[in-house]
Amino acid sequence: MNMAFEDYKTKQAVAVVYTGEGKGKTSASVGLMARALGTGWRVAFIQFIKTWKVGEHDFIHKIEPLFAKKLLFYKGGKGFYQAGELSAKDVTETEHRQAAQTTYDQAFKAATSGKFDLVICDEINNAVHHKLITKNQLKDLIKKRALKTSLCLTGRNFPKDLLPMVDIATNMTKLKHHFDKKYLANKGIDF
C-alpha cells in the first residue's frame, strides 16, 4: 500500500521535547523555529539560562525584521547555575530564581495567549532540574497552553514522569564530545 503524505493524519498542536546529555537541543529548536516561520506560523522563542552572546541570538536578531509580526524573542537568563566553574559569577541564587520566574511568565503568557502557533522554551528543562522554577509550573505550561499552540521544551533532564504529557521526545545522546578533552566550546558549533 502506497499512501500519499496528505493521507496521513495530522495533529493541530503538539508538545516536543529535546533533552539529554548530547549537543544539539537548542540547534534542533532553532531548526524547528525556521520550519515554523517558513510555513507562516507565529513563533515565540523564549530562552532560559543563556545570557552570553551565542550564535542563535545573532541569527534571531538578523531575521526579526523579516518576520516582524511573526517572531517574538525573549532572553531571560542569568547564566549557568550550579555548574561548577562554569557557573555565572556574581549572580545570587535569588537573582537566578527571579530571572527564571520572569522568563517562565513570558513563556506562559505566550503559550496561553493563542497568539502563537509555536512557543519554544529553550533550556527550560535545566531551570526545572535546578529548581529555579517548579515541575508543576512546567506541567501547567504543557497542560494550559492554547489548543492551537505547539510547544517545544529543550534542555537536559526533562522529568521522565511528564513524558506521557508530550507527543514527541528526543533524547540527544552524546557519543563523543571534545569537551571531555577540556575544550570548552567552538563558536558556530557549540554556541
Image (cartoon, rainbow, N blue to C red):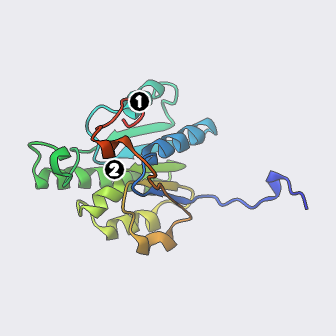
- Determine the residue positioned at 53% across, 55% down: 149
Q: Position of residue 140 (x, y in %)?
A: 39, 67
Specify whether 134 is left or right of 11. left
Q: In the figure, residue 13 lies in which quadrant?
A: bottom right
Kindly identify the amino acid type of the residue bearing the numbered disc 1: Gly
Give amino acid for label 2. Gln
Query: Could you tell which of marks 1 and 2 lies nearer the N-terminus?
Result: 2
In this view, 124 is above or below 184:
below
Outermost front residue: 181
Q: Quadrant of the C terminus?
A: top left
Label 2 neighbourhood size at 10 Å, few (<14), some (14-19), many (20+)? some
Compare residues 25 and 117 and report the one nearer the observer.
25
**Percent position (x, y) of residue 59?**
44, 28
Provide the residue designation for mark 2.
106
What's the CA distance linking mark 1 and mark 2? 27 Å
Is the residue 44 above or below the residue 157 in the image? above
Q: Which residue is mark 1?
A: 188
Q: Dot 1: what SS?
A: loop
Is 178 situated left or right of 99 in this image? right
Which quadrant is home to the N terminus? bottom right
Q: Residues within 10 Å of mark 1 (few under 14, many from 20)?
A: few
The answer to whether mark 1 and mark 2 are in CB contact below 8 A is no
Q: Position of residue 68 (x, y in %)?
A: 48, 30
| Residue at 22%, 44% in the rendered image | 79
Q: Residue at 61% of width from left, 38% of height from top?
A: 40
Q: Which mark is residue 14?
A: none
The residue depicted at 38 percent of the width and 54 percent of the height is 155
Residue 38 on image: x %, y %: 61, 36
